[in-house]
Amino acid sequence: MPQVIFHGVRGSYPCPGPEFAEFGGNTACIEFRQEDGQPILFDLGTGITRLASQIENQDSYSAAALVSHTHWDHIQGLPFFTPLHHPGTHLDIYSPFDSRSSLIEAFDKAFTPPLFPVAWDQLGGKLIFHELSSFQFAIGSVSVKCARVPHPGVSYGYRIDDRGVSLAYVSDHQMPEDRQAISSEVLELCHNVDVLVHDAQYTNEEFLSKSDWGHCTIEYAIHVALSAGARTLIIFHHDPSHNDTIMRHISVQACKSAEKFNLNLVVAKEGMTIDL
Ligand SMILES: [Zn+2]
Ligand SMILES: [Zn+2]
């Protein structure tokens, strides 16, 4: 049975410390793990370092990564991903094309001296960059679709379908002013999906002062899930100011809101595993 494992569920920046121990402080990194076939990662935030600690054979790790966009919280774990120090490692990185900077240029700028001691192309492992020019492709037996998600810069959501199970990943979703409109691309991507992993960074009150910061509320995530016919909604990309006390309160409110619509809602925690 394939599984989804949440290695990092925070947005914006990591938040370590005992007050975040229950929900976790690592930034976005989620893994689709199959019994056969290589793992597929969604984003490369600091959660990927948690994944690294679980890989027994780091000499020959092989995976594909679907990167939503190159904002820090979605890529900053990559240079610290220890399998990359081994020549047998192979990581295919898929990401949207941004005309301001190619994918390789973006990684070059971020992970090169003096910002990082070793250039990414000298890490040992093999990184293959794929700038997406098509909205549909395959990784092994897994069908992958992608769609533009409203957010500053170019950002993609992804959907994977494999042997009767489907998962959509929509991070960093700018809620419109009317709090209702949903882009047709996002709706199509999430149509009747088994599991939708979606941004839900802000409460309604927080959104009032952060309405153009590229994110959405829990209510909007529920609205997207219901409109698209998703069977289970998993909210993540939690705001780093939300400690465990706040997150527990948010969780109760979110589940109450979803219950009204008979929607199965899960609040992501770091380390959580879901069977698909
Ligand atoms: Zn983000
Ligand atoms: Zn972002």
Image (cartoon, rainbow, N blue to C red):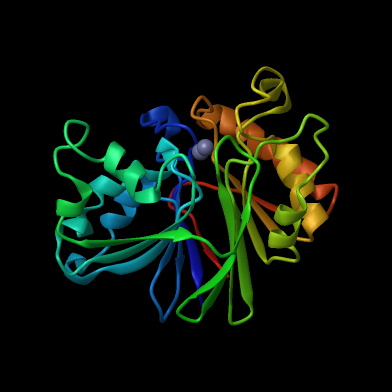
Please tell me whether residue 227 is drawn above or below residue 255 in the rendered image: below
Residue appearing at x 60%, y 34% in the figure: 201
Q: Is residue 263 visible?
A: no
Residue appearing at x 21%, y 59% in the figure: 83
| Direction from residue 40 to residue 190 in the image, left or right | right
Q: Depth check: 216 or 1 in front?
A: 216
| Direction from residue 107 to residue 2 in the image, left or right | right
Residue found farthest to the front: 99
Please tell me whether residue 219 is drawn above or below residue 158 in the rendered image: above
| Direction from residue 191 to residue 151 in the image, left or right | left
| Direction from residue 130 to residue 232 in the image, left or right | right
Please tell me whether residue 102 is drawn above or below residue 33 in the rendered image: above
Residue 18, image x and y in percent?
Answer: 38, 30
Quadrant in which the C terminus appears = bottom right
Q: Is residue 12 visible?
A: yes
Please tell me whether residue 69 is drawn above or below residue 88 in the rendered image: above
Label tally:
0
Residue appearing at x 63%, y 51% in the figure: 148
Residue 132, image x and y in percent?
Answer: 49, 60
In the figure, residue 118 lies in which quadrant?
Answer: top left
Residue 223, image x and y in percent?
Answer: 79, 46
Residue appearing at x 80%, y 34% in the figure: 179
In the figure, residue 62 lies in which quadrant?
Answer: bottom left
Q: Depth check: 139 or 228 in front?
A: 139
